[in-house]
Image: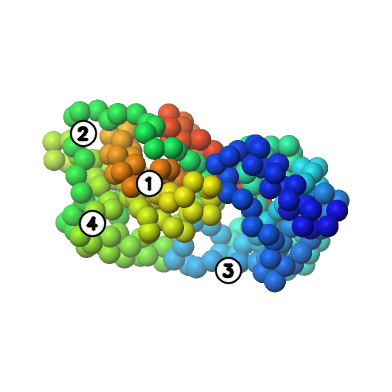
Amino acid sequence: MDVAEIEAEHAARVHALDPLLPAPPPLAPGAGHLLTSTGGAAIAWPQRGLESDPWGPLRRHLLEVRLARPDALGDLLDQWFDLIHSSVEPGDLECAAVVEVPSRDTEGVFALVQRGFVPVSVAAARMAGRGLAGPADVLVRPAEPADLATVLELAVAVVEYDAPFGKITPRPAAIEALRDQMAGLLATPDPRIWVGCRDGEVLGSVYVQLPPESAWCARYTSVPGPAYLASMSVRADQRGSGVGTALAAHAHAVMDAGAPLTLLHHALPNPRSTPFWYRNGYRPLWTTWMRRPILR
């Protein structure tokens, strides 16, 4: 079975599992190292992150797989480790092996578990019109430049709360980058950040991206023109009080007006965000598995 045949069978298999998945593009050998196995193929390549990016370790070894047979994944993973192990420092927490697979493609995931990978995050999808209504006592309004300190504090809280779950890494440069990003968003005429308030006090915030700004995430789905819910945070003492539901309902109304589907990323082990988002109409689309550090 050549690579083209593997790709075709992989595409048919995952489409049958989940019609929201996009048609997988052909593997690009020029982008990295091509690995092949009976019933499987993959491209492996390294990626260097930025100090200002908290959403992963600085050094990532990535693997993109195509599986005509899910049981081929184990052999591809073993070939990958043979390829990268000599360039990895034992115990380096800023270096990780990362594989992203369709969430419903579960037949091969035990190969990841056997090799020390854990599922750290999910790209989840929600069709327009799904979700809960927010409580009437929470006022949701566009964030203003005067809200910068509060909005930044809420954004940093998301990073710090999710950090123990394995993917996110707080760094001083990342906090400064968040400040600059929030300040830029608050200065634009079209609101992208909203805050939820009771009695005039800001208790949470939500940040959304609409097309064309959200075009970068179109690769995750077969549905054209998705929106992206970039982040949401509620003050710790207000969790469970309805503020998050009100913010999500408002964000969904905004995004549903211009997009048929919304995507977001959440930390899968997070005991708050995972049940919250699925109550609000989302379901898993892609799961990111990570081994960090690669060598202990």
Q: Earlier in the sequence, mark 2 or mark 3?
A: 3
Return the disc, 1 or 3, that comes first in the chain's sequence.
3
- Point 18% across, 29% down: residue: 137
Q: Which residue is mark 1?
A: 259
- Horizontal and vertical percent position of residue 280: 40, 32
**Which amino acid type is shown beneath numbered disc 3?**
Arg
Identify the residue under disc 3: 48
Residue under the point 48% across and 41% down: 125
Q: Give amino acid for label 2.
A: Val
| Three-letter code for the amino acid on which mark 1 is drawn | Ala
Q: Is 61 left, or right, of 35 in this rendering?
A: left
Name the residue tied to disc 4: 190
Graded by Cα atoms within 10 Å as few (under 14), some (14 to 19) or many (20 or more), the crowding at tag 3 reads few
Evaluate if marks 1 and 2 touch, with contact meaning CB atoms under 8 Å apart.
no
Distance in Å between CA atoms under marks 1 and 4 = 16 Å
Using the rendered view, name the quadrant where residue 109 is placed.
top right
Q: Considering only vertical position in the picture, is 18 above or below 189?
A: above
Please give the label number shown on residue 138.
2
Pointer 3 and pointer 4: residues touching (CB < 8 Å)? no
Which quarter of the figure is the C terminus placed in?
bottom right
Could you tell me residue 18's position as x and y percent? 60, 38
